[in-house]
Image: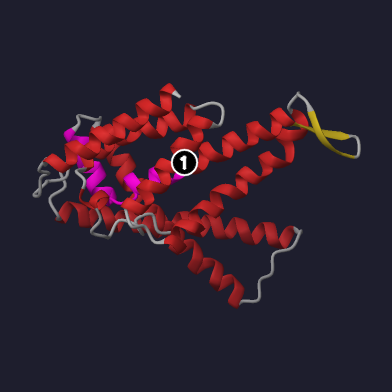
Amino acid sequence: MHLEEFAQGHSPLHRLDPRVKVLAGLPPIAAAALASGLRAPAVALLAGVGAALLGRLDARKLGVRLLAANVFILTLWVFLPFSHPGEAVFSLGPLAASREGLLYALSITLKANAAVLLTIALFGTSESLALAHALVHLRAPRKLVYLFFFFSRYLELVHEEYGRLRNAMRIRCFRPRTGAHTYRSYAYLVGMLLVRSAERARRLYGAMLLRGFRGHFPVIDHFHLHGRDLALGGLLLGLALVVALL
């Protein structure tokens, strides 16, 4: 699990001021999530594809992320057409799929993919430290900012530790089955993960103190707002307005 796999690059979105991303990036994502019907979600999805192209995101990695999101959405296609009232389109035994249910599932699919694309393109192209720095500049509560930073930064480390423990179990010929041995093994796995995470947290805290952490991070590099930042920010706000009005 690598949360910053899109952060390295030289596209216009990688160079965009993170403060502008936070202020102008959230409205189009919120507009896409709250859009109704098909026209506004379709426009938001096109904007998401455009943002992904502008950010020059790796197509294979982006496809993996979209696939993970659409696995959940696929379950909606199983239930929504048969549970939403409306004009029957086809039947599977005693169950009838409605036209309104199919359109509703399609609308959710468009909105979800648009929101994922916009989120990855706008926020995935910045490192978590830069976004945390931008939130501090925007006067966000420091405790919430540090919570966001540590969660995004060290979730990957915890996942790597989990992977090492799982591999160690497989080397010892562990095969998950339904039984007390499997449940006990997973309980040991979670317990060991907590112990190792606590040990790593102590080491990290010591490293932070050595780097001058005294309740806040000393910041050396600061942002500089350019004309292109304002232009892209205005474009994002305009997109949010268009999606909201459709």
Residue at horizontal 26 percent and vertical 49 percent from the top: 13
**Occupied quadrant, residue 95:** top right
Q: Is residue 215 visible?
A: no
Residue at image position (54%, 71%) is: 167
* 2, above or below 99, in the image: below
How many dots with numbers?
A: 1
Q: Which residues are magenta?
A: 116-137
Q: In front here: 227 or 200?
A: 227
73 on left or right of 158: right
In percent of width and height, residue 68 lies at 55, 52
- Queried whether the magenta region covers residue 132, the answer comes back as yes
Majority secondary structure of the magenta segment?
Answer: helix
Quadrant where the N terminus sits is bottom left
**Quadrant showing the C terminus:** top left
Please state if 84 lies on the left or on the right of 116 as rendered: right
Q: In front here: 205 or 109? A: 109
Q: Nearer the viewer, residue 4 or 229?
A: 229
The residue that label 1 is drawn on is 45
Judging from the image, the colouring scheme is secondary structure
Left or right of 124? Residue 185 is: right
Tell me which residue sits at (16%, 47%) in the image: 213
- The quarter holding residue 26 reads top left
Q: Position of residue 204 (x, y in %)?
A: 28, 56
Residue in the image at 58% along x and 48% along y: 70
Which of 240/80 is in front? 240
- Queried whether the magenta region covers residue 135, the answer comes back as yes
Say what amino acid the circle numbered 1 marks: Leu
Vertical side of 229 occupied by 54: above or below: below
Image position, residue 137 (x, y; %): 16, 35
Residue 186 visible in this rendered orientation of the protein: yes
